[in-house]
Image (spheres, grey):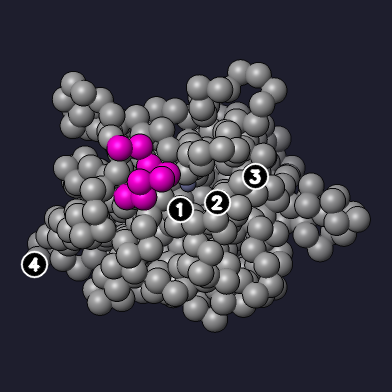
């Protein structure tokens, strides 16, 4: 559409911080010129020598009245937007509730007996009274809430309902969040309840396609909004369905998302249901679902051969530490995944995870890595630090959603998906005394910050959230 390039340009001035690598923050001051403010804006120019707004207007050759202008405050900075590579939009009303069994000392999900997917209580799909109005309320809330926490890109699981999934896509597009939307495919009669499954593999495929085509009609370029093929996880699908979806993803060059190797009970179930395959990973590999556009959530208990297959296929892992702790699933060996050349990102796994905040996922990834070091004889090599966590949340996320080099930083040509953080606002949960170095302020932000520090959020240059 021609309108895509009609937006006003914008200048962002002040402090820019990013985590281009796992070990060091990039902290710069200067100005960035964004090509458009209407959702397709990319960084046209940067200048890290400028010290005044007037110098920025002059350097970029624009008149003040012709551009939008944003400047960070003293304890403020621009940071790349967070990328949540695994979130169940339909489970958002359950955050903090988990399963009905919650309340005692039991694990937060039953991993014995009939497997429940990842706690698959889809709150927007069962309703007998006007399910779409419920979906509208829940999906509006989850998009606005994640944006308010600085999540500029999210890879969503919806439900098996085509209309409700399409509604999620409509809303993400309307609110301007960069989103990958997946209609959940599940049809295995042994593991899915009769009221909540596709009737046949062909129907599962047809429903997937119906939703894909709706999403592609909304955004034909697929840059802001794109479909993602979403078999819930191997045990919830018949083998034929997995193969049909694998073929679909290959034929149409689509992203894929699913779960893998989350907990011990699930591994036994996969072995039982798919005896003909060498491993859990092999089920996805042989059915064509393991591609370089595939995001696998969890990946906690993978063996070395599986890691090798995932690396060779170029598939990605979404690490969901809060969910793994809440459900007692185990410790994801992030260091081992990275050392094996596998791209890793962070996911909230709402509502297995209790929070929509990727900042909280960074925190939890740091904590879980230390527990993993403890169970491995105190080896500090497992540790994930704040900078590495932020790198996973931004650059790692970009790699996992196929947007490497386009999201996660402030280099010319990158999309302007950015959150403006203010550490010293009236309601800030972070106390800055003024003597802290900037890397220390970032540490404080990660450990104590939350949505109250998120001042503004832009996706493709379009302001999609303002906290003040
Ligand atoms: Zn999940």
User: Relative to 167, is 340 on the left or the right?
Assistant: right
Q: Mark 4 points at which residue?
A: 2
Q: Give the range drawn in magenta.
A: 187-194
Answer whether labels 1 and 3 touch (C-beta < 8 Å).
no
Answer whether labels 2 and 4 touch (C-beta < 8 Å).
no
Under circle 1, the secondary element is helix
- Name the disc covering residue 235, or none: 1
Q: Which residue is drawn at 48% across and 67% down?
A: 283
The CA span between labels 3 and 4 is: 49 Å
Q: Name the residue under label 2.
A: 269
Under circle 4, the secondary element is helix
The CA span between labels 3 and 2 is: 15 Å
The CA span between labels 2 and 1 is: 7 Å
| Position above or below: 337 against 76 | below
Disc with the residue nearer the chain's start (2 vs 1): 1
The CA span between labels 1 and 3 is: 17 Å
- Name the disc covering residue 329, or none: 3
Was residue 189 drawn as part of the magenta stretch in this picture? yes
């Amino acid at each position: 559409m021609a309108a895509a390039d009609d937006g006003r340009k914008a200048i962002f001035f002040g402090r820019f911080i990013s985590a281009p690598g796992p070990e060091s923050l990039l902290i710069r001051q200067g100005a960035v010129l964004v090509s458009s403010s209407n959702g397709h804006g990319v960084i046209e120019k940067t200048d890290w020598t400028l010290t005044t707004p007037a110098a920025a207007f002059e350097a970029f050759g624009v008149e003040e009245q012709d551009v939008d202008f944003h400047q960070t405050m003293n304890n403020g900075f621009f940071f790349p937007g967070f990328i949540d590579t695994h979130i169940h939009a339909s489970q958002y009303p359950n955050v903090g509730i988990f399963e009905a069994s919650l309340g005692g000392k039991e694990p937060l999900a039953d991993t014995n007996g009939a497997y429940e997917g990842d706690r698959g209580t889809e709150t927007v799909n069962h309703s007998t009274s006007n399910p779409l109005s419920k979906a509208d309320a829940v999906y509006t809330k989850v998009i606005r809430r994640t944006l308010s926490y600085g999540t500029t890109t999210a890879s969503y699981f919806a439900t098996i309902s085509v209309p409700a999934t399409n509604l999620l896509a409509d809303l993400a597009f309307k609110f301007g969040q960069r989103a990958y939307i997946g209609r959940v495919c599940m049809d295995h009669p042994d593991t899915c309840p009769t009221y909540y499954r596709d009737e046949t593999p062909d129907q599962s495929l047809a429903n997937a396609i119906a939703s894909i085509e709706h999403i592609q009609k909304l955004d034909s370029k697929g840059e802001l909004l794109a479909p993602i093929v979403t078999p819930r996880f191997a045990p919830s699908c018949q083998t034929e369905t997995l193969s049909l979806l694998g073929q679909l993803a290959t034929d149409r060059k689509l992203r894929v998302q699913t779960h893998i190797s989350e907990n011990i009970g699930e591994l036994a179930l996969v072995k039982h249901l798919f005896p003909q395959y060498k491993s859990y990973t092999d089920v996805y590999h042989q059915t064509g679902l393991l591609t370089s556009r595939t995001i696998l959530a969890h990946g906690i208990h993978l063996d070395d051969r599986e890691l090798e297959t995932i690396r060779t296929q170029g598939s990605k892992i979404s690490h969901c530490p809060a969910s793994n702790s809440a459900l007692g699933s185990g410790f994801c060996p992030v260091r081992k995944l990275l050392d094996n050349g596998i791209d890793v990102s962070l996911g909230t796994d709402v509502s297995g995870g209790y929070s929509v905040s990727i900042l909280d996922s960074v925190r939890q990834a740091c904590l879980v890595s230390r527990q993993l070091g403890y169970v491995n004889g105190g080896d500090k090599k497992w540790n994930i630090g704040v900078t590495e966590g932020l790198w996973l949340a931004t650059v790692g996320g970009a790699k996992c959603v196929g947007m490497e080099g386009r999201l996660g930083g402030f280099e010319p040509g990158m999309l302007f998906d950015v959150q403006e953080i203010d550490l010293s606002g009236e309601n800030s949960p972070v106390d800055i005394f003024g003597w802290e170095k900037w890397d220390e302020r970032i540490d404080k932000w990660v450990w104590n910050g939350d949505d109250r520090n998120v001042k503004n959020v832009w996706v493709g240059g379009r302001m999609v959230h303002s906290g003040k």
